[in-house]
Image (tube, rainbow, N blue to C red):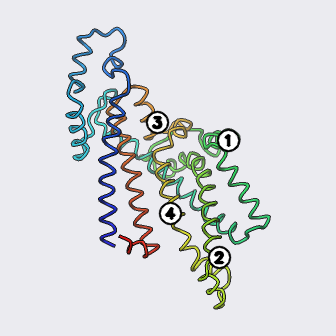
Amino acid sequence: MLRFALSRALSLALSLVVASVVIFAVIEVIPGDPASYMLGMNATPEAVAALRDQLGLNAAPVARYLAWAGGMLTGDFGTSYTYKVPVAELVMQRLWVSLPLALYALALSTLIALPVGLIAAARRGSATDYGIMGATQLGIAVPNFWFAMLLVLVFAVNLRWFSAGGFPGWAGGAGPAVKALTLPALALALPQASILARVLRSALIETLGQDYIRTARAKGLTRRQATVRHALRNAMIPVLTIIGLQFSFLLAGAIIIENVFYLPGLGRLIFQAITQRDLIVVESLVMLLVFAVILVTFLVDLAYAGVDPRLRKRV
């Protein structure tokens, strides 16, 4: 197991190095001068040159990349051009919104998808199965921002059970904060639950046709016992893949939902940084999100090895 984990950790480190180079290179080729944008059209060339020197934009690209990458390794992500505060401080403030939102949405997605996928697989070919598959297809086809607006219309405008947007912060207690995240989490969770339920159904149906399941049934196990004790565990590998990808998407891809509900999260911050040409914030945020995606993939690989010991022997 240790050898397996070390090989995956090495792959993680190499992926991060490549990702940092690509992110920095892409930011470099974006047209426009951040200093000119910040000072406006009426700025003098001398003022623009002085600001570029202050921001370190006059240094060679290799030197700026090494300074940026080295700073990230020590926890120094630089200072935002727009907000005049350390980027790490901005990220920590927004992370306390985006991370609970992603975990909340992932928990809802999993709680919805697992029983739905189990029922659909257990009743394959029945009216229940067809109904579930139709509902999940609709959940995949409809954009999550449409779900968000529908939830606001029903639960905020008509029923007045939740607020239509905003975030009160965690200082006022967990109850109001979780309540403010409920509608955004549902809007994010419903499409993801549809995908996860379909994957689980397909994996279970394939697993239930294996010889060892027929042997377990021949020994006296009921279909439910064979499904829960044997088939479910072996069907979890593709499910774990989807769950890992979903968490990465929910953490990094909630820009639209955070803007619909006016949530001060990472998605909204990166959107604002792009529009304001705050390149140091964009670079650092994208790199952190890439790190989160790669780290989740690493943890999913370790979960694979825990679920299926055969994977550990291939390394």
In 3D space, how far apart are the residues under numbered discs 4 and 3 (Cα atoms)? 28 Å
Looking at the picture, does residue 221 appear above or below residue 14? below
In 3D space, how far apart are the residues under numbered discs 2 and 4 (Cα atoms)? 21 Å
Assess disc 4: are there few (<14), some (14-19) or many (≥20) residues with their C-alpha within 10 Å of its C-alpha. Answer: many
Query: Which quarter of the image is occupied by the N terminus?
Result: bottom left
Q: Which residue is mark 3?
A: 268
Give the secondary structure at mark 4.
helix
Residue type of the residue flagged with mark 2: Gly
Give the secondary structure at mark 3.
helix
Whether tag 2 and tag 4 are in contact, CB under 8 A, the answer is no
Image depth: mark 2 or mark 4 in front: 2
Q: Which residue is mark 1?
A: 150
Say whether disc 1 or disc 4 marks the residue closer to the N-terminus.
1
Residue type of the residue flagged with mark 4: Leu
Image depth: mark 4 or mark 3 in front: 4
Q: Tag on residue 209?
A: 2
